[in-house]
Image (cartoon, grey):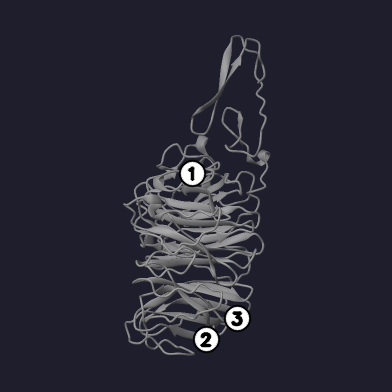
Amino acid sequence: MNYITIFGGRGFEIGYDIKVDGDNIFLVGRTNSDDIPLTTGNPPIGFGDRQGFLGKIKEIDGTIEALKVIGGLKWNDFRAIDIHSDKIIVAGTSEGSGTVTNVAQTGAYNQTVAGSLDVIVGEISADLNFIWLTHFGGDSGDRPVDIEFSDNNGHFFLVGDTNTKSYSIQQNTPPTDGGFPKYSSSGSDSFPKGNGSSDNIEDVFIAEFDAGNNLLWSTFYGGNGADRFGPGANKIAVASNNKVAIVFSTSNFSTFPPPDTYGSFFQTGKGEHVVSVFVDRKLDWASAYGCFENNSIFPFQESGESVIYSSDGTLIAFGSTDCEPVPFLEYCGLPSSVLDYPVCPPYGLDLYFQGTVGSPLLQGGKDISIMGFTPSYLFKYGTYFGGNADEYVSCVANLSNGDFIFAGITESDIDFPLEFPASPDDMYKQETLYGSRDNFLAKLPIGGLTVTSVKENERSLSSGLKVFPNPVFGQQSVTLTFAPLSFDSEINLVNSLGQLIKTFALERGNSEL
């Protein structure tokens, strides 16, 4: 560990998101301290108020270069930040008028205060001054969760959750009627609130802005239950081929809008994490993932989720689960029961797998779920991660060598999968849970999932019959040889759900199929 530092005042501070740009670290969050060590501007109006802060810190030693509070008569915060080619976008919440003042920009989206709790989104300079700042949302509570740039064109995507009940009637223009911004173009999806249900509690939303900060697309997304993002970061991932993946949680996945294709993996459940992929602003694939048996997906703050794309297009979705694993014959396929957790050992690859291939281990009340999918949505990797108590993920990031790191919370004091590299000798090692709940940091490889060969993926049953995971890439040929039959017989081909696919008739004397 190079250093550890803290900053704050006599109240509380929360840092929600962080990004590194060159030699600097940019941090956003909230504070209610009237003595926070600001480098510019004024502290919160009074001790106990809640206002957003923007911070810039030297990466080399943690020195504060700039720190300022943004706010007014009511509370606000900043929840997300992303940086692309020196452009810095931040998003947060603002409690009505008199809190945050818009900074208009020609050609950009500019909306006035809409409700009691709005999203605020803006562009800041390297010295933390606003170049552009606007409100975004409808007449009820709208909360941002994450921002992600596209490397293709400088566009950025904003996701969050909303209680606003309907779209504005003012399409493709900043609304003034209390409705949610409705921006769409030919061919893009625009889903009604709750997918048309009158029982909807809240939906998530997705919005896309262009390089000039103008809104191009926005839509509700969800079903007739509660759809919400859990704590932590990395709720959205953008791939180079116009794919946008989001993860969140729902109380009822069965009422979601159907995707264009269900892909090879489509899991349903009684209240689960959800992963969805949009391509060119259309829903391409969606599935529940993971499993909850004794624990509910509620409360959301006890069950985080994150998503990331690897350099080869593999999608990795993180969540939590308390379910026992699927039976062996259902590995790498859809569970036949909503109370089984889908596992998929990384056959032939040096990837982490908790337990052994024949005995995957759920070690605690709630372990982290890690599931990997190829660009065509084949389920290629699934494992538990955790110890004897509860864990959940907070954030994830790619490394330049193809590995990824993820961080989260653990309550486990036994069986947590600790591992330390052989060098350097002075690396930071914490081998004991010091409190009731500690943070953890882990690094795992993910390379090779998309290009794994069929041969590497085969496994053997005790009878000696080689079985290939379902699904596989393309058409496969399997030849069975056996002693000549002394009677007519048949062989049934079934899928991982036990459903009959085809029956092969065998005549007496046959020795091969």
* Sequence order check, earlier mark of 1 and 2: 2
The secondary element bearing badge 2 is classed as strand
Mark 1 → mark 2, Cα distance in angstroms: 47 Å
Left or right of 297, for residue 447: right
Q: Position of residue 225 (x, y in %)?
A: 35, 52
Q: Marks 3/2: CA distance?
A: 15 Å
**Up-down relation of residue 33 to residue 265 (above or below):** below
Q: Which residue is mark 3?
A: 60
C-alpha span from label 3 to label 1: 42 Å
Q: Contact (CB < 8 A) between labels 3 and 2?
A: no
Crowd around label 3: few <14 · some 14–19 · many ≥20 (10 Å): few
Query: Badge 1 is on which residue?
Result: 342
Name the N-terminal-most of marks 3 and 2: 3
**Amino acid type shown at disc 3:** Ile
For mark 1, give the secondary structure. Answer: loop
Query: What residue is pinned by disc 2?
Result: 66
Q: Nearer the viewer, mark 3 or mark 2?
A: 2
